[in-house]
Amino acid sequence: MSVAFEDWAQLAGDSPTSRTEWAALVAAWSEPHRRYHDLAHLAAVLGIVGRLAVHAADPAAVRLAGWYHDAVYDPRRGDNEEVSAERARIGLRGLVDDATVEEVARLVLLTAGHDPAPVDTNGAVLCDADLAVLAGPPESYAAYASAVREEYRHLTDEEFTAGRAAVLEHLLALPALYRLPETAAQWTDRARANLAAELSLLRARSAPPGS
């Protein structure tokens, strides 16, 4: 799926308010400091959500959550998901019903830990789509990891290594990286191999000489 207004309008309607919100979202996802969490990532997530939406209880809410899940992305702060969820509440007001607004906000918050409840099909679709990059070929994963490092270029190598290792360890410790049966079967082994390889590389780089 693309990030064109026509795709957005299927979810939020075609009105001056909807057009303004779409333009604001595209601008947010186009911020110059973004290297991975950019329009390409948004389009990728929306495309995968579109393919997996048949599993969701509320496909429209999941698609909208895809638009907002990294709408606010500042690598210097730790509450991007919370602020993005609030951004969704404000931006969607008057465009969709209140129940959908709250479901979108809930789903956005889930992307902080990527650990939806087993019965949460909406959460499973969004989180699986967001983590699909982890299951890419090694060269694609390496490009993703490099882009994430660029987003955190304000950190020293030591600071970044500690933070990134904690993220990788959290993902590897999840009971399941992917929650839908088809994505779990197709992506889990490759994703875990990529995560483990990056974590091993980070640990090797941070190890004292001669250790």
Image (cartoon, rainbow, N blue to C red):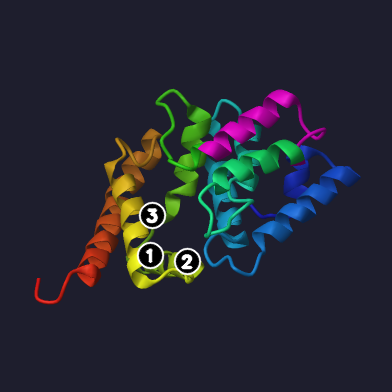
Please tell me whether residue 177 is drawn above or below residue 158 in the rendered image.
Answer: above
Q: Secondary structure at mark 2?
A: loop
Q: Are marks 3 and 1 in contact (CB under 8 Å)?
A: no
Q: Nearer the viewer, residue 61 or 198?
A: 198
Q: Which residues are magenta?
A: 91-109
Q: Mark 1, residues whose alpha carbon is within 10 Å: few (<14), some, or many (≥20)?
A: some
| Residue situated furthest right in the rendering | 16
Q: Position of residue 78 (x, y in %)?
A: 50, 50
C-alpha distance separating marks 3 and 1:
19 Å
Please tell me whether residue 90 is drawn above or below residue 23 in the rendered image.
Answer: above
- Is residue 179 in sight in this rendering? yes
Instruction: Name which residue lies at 53% across and 54% down.
Output: 77
Label disc, if present, on residue 68 of the rendered structure: none
C-alpha distance separating marks 3 and 2:
18 Å
- Residue 105 on the magenta span: yes
Amino acid, disc 3: Leu
User: Which image quadrant: the C terminus?
Assistant: bottom left
Amino acid, disc 1: Phe
* First of labels 3, 2 by sequence position: 3
Amino acid, disc 2: Tyr
